[in-house]
Structure formats: C-alpha cells, structure tokens
Image (cartoon, helix red, strand yellow):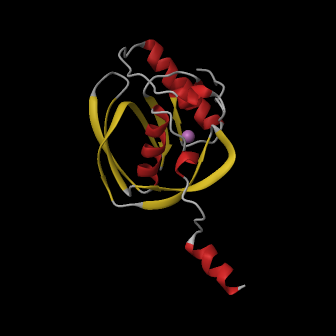
Amino acid sequence: MAIRNVVQIGDEILRKKSKPVREFDEKLWELLDDMRETMLKNNGCGLAAVQVGVLRRAIVLDVNHMRIELINPEIIDSFGEQIEKEGCLSVKNEYGYVKRPQQVTVQAQDRYGNEFEITGVDLLAKAFCHEIDHLDGVLFTDKLVKDYREPKAKSKKNKD
Ligand code: CO
C-alpha cells in the first residue's frame, strides 16, 4: 500500500465525471487499498478515486467504525433532510453547511464486482452523498447553504 497525493480544489480533474469501473482486478484493489491508507493518514472519513487523480467510480469510507467500499454507486432511494457541516480532503481548511437527505440507500458493487445495497442515516447518508458527488465533479462548496448558523450559535448570538 502507498499513500497518494490528494488533489486540491482548483485542479480541473475534480470537475470531471468519473467513468464506471469495469475491471475488478488487482489494480482496482491496489487503488482501493491506497485510497484507504491515504484517507486515514489525512484523518478523513471518505475519499473518492478522483481525489487521488483516478477518474473511476470508486469510493472508500470509514464512518462509525464501518469500512465501506462503493464501486459504481447509485443512490436508489432517499428520505428526509439534514443540514450539517462538511469538509473535504480536497478543500483544506474550509467547512460549510450542506443540505442532504437524512437517509440514503445506495446500490453499488464491492471490490469483487458483487452487487449490494446499503442504507445510511445521518452522518453516513451525508458521506454517501458527498462522495458520490465527487464522481460527478461536484464539490460540497457548490452546495453551501448560505448564511446558515447552527441553532445553538444562533440563539447565543441573539442574546448579544
Ligand atoms: Co470530499
């Protein structure tokens, strides 16, 4: 395994649409292993292949102590909404609030090409959406909820 460089915002590759993974071979497994190592090294909880410069529809996640790999993921169902803070390993030192579904069901393949479905709520739903957006060239900074403040911060401010 090896740690790869994380592409930063401004690099046009982050705006490109990733292509489907067709070969579930050792090259893919090495990519996924490297992505996981790179994500963990950078204290991230999700990483898409494009973020290490590979335009393939592959994602690794580490959320709630769950190691998840999504190959060719599609959101097939979603429910509710949440507005939560997001950051991105490709957008260093910037955070913002984004509206996402509260619950998301994804259909994907594992590293061997087997199809499966997985449902995530809250943080996991947010992570699925954030990472799948990367596969279509979308960054969280495109979707910021302007002027959003956490309810707690808002009430505190109102007292001033
Ligand atoms: Co990201």
Asked which quadrant contains residue 19, the reply is top left
Residue 143, compared with residue 32, is above or below; it is below
Q: Quadrant of the C terminus?
A: bottom right
Is residue 126 rendered to the left or right of residue 53?
Answer: left
Q: Closest to the observer: 112 or 71?
A: 71
Nearest the camera: 121 or 54? 54
Count of labels in the image: 0
- Residue at x-position 40% and y-position 13%: 25
Q: Is residue 43 left or right of residue 36?
A: right
Q: Position of residue 2 (x, y in %)?
A: 62, 21
**Residue for point 46% across, 32% down:** 135
Q: Specify the quadrant that holds the N terminus.
A: top right
User: Where residue 120 sits in the image (x, y, percent)?
Assistant: 37, 50
Q: Residue at x 63, y 24 (%)?
A: 4
Point out residue 87 in the picture as x, y percentages from the top left corner: 60, 48
| 37 versus 78 height, above or below | above
User: Ligand 1 appears in which quadrant?
Assistant: top right
* 148 over 64 or under it: above or below: below
Residue 13 lies, in percent from the top left, at: 58, 25
